[in-house]
Amino acid sequence: MATIVAITSCPTGIAHTFMAAEGLEQAAVKLGHTIKVETQGSVGAQNQLNEADVAAADIVVIAADTSVDLTRFAGKRIYETSTKAAINDGAAVIQSALKEAAVAGSKQGGPQRIV
């Protein structure tokens, strides 16, 4: 069982942001993982990740169609994808993230971006 934190965000910050969050949350539960998802939508950030959340995380999933500041995840394994991927198959996103997430600046070349 992995502890996952995630951020979802789309340009308009309405439907896709929250649909992607739901896709990841449902998939994590189904796969036996714990997850906390911060949504960065039109109403600002909701369910914000705090330092303890980030510290406890095994991986970070960014499902966004916008630029997300990754500074607070320094030293963490990060996996980047689109909101579409998280909406269509959250389980595949989580499984790929667990296998492919990489620490930014590591020999593996940093976060993996799968669209």
Image: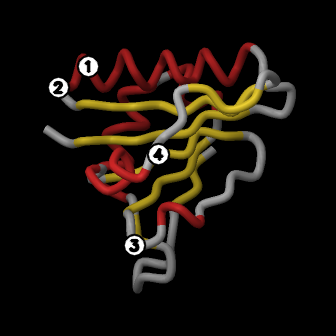
Task: Where is residue 23? Give x, y as percent.
Answer: 48, 19
Residue at image mark 1: 29
Mark 1–mark 2 CB contact (< 8 Å): yes
Mark 4 to mark 3 CA distance (whole Å): 14 Å
Compared to residue 100, the image places residue 109 above or below, namely: below
Mark 2, Cα crowd under 10 Å, few <14 / some 14-19 / many 20+, is few
What is the basis of the colouring in this image? secondary structure
Residue 68, label in figure: none
Q: Is residue 89 left or right of residue 4?
A: right
Compared to residue 60, the image places residue 70 above or below, namely: below
Mark 2 to mark 4 CA distance (whole Å): 16 Å
The local secondary structure at tag 3 comes to loop
Residue at image mark 2: 32
Residue at image mark 4: 61
Which is in the foreground here, disc 2 or disc 3?
3
**Which image quarter is the C terminus in?**
top right
The local secondary structure at tag 2 comes to loop
The residue drawn where x is 36% and y is 27% is 91
Residue at image mark 3: 75
Give the residue type that dot 1 points to.
Val
Give the residue type that dot 2 points to.
Gly
Of the numbered discs 2 and 3, the one sitting upstream in the chain is 2
The quadrant in which residue 106 appears is bottom left
Compared to residue 42, the image places residue 114 above or below, namely: below
Mark 1, Cα crowd under 10 Å, few <14 / some 14-19 / many 20+, is few
Mark 3 to mark 1 CA distance (whole Å): 25 Å
Mark 1 to mark 2 CA distance (whole Å): 5 Å
Q: Is residue 60 left or right of residue 19?
A: left
Give the residue type that dot 4 points to.
Val
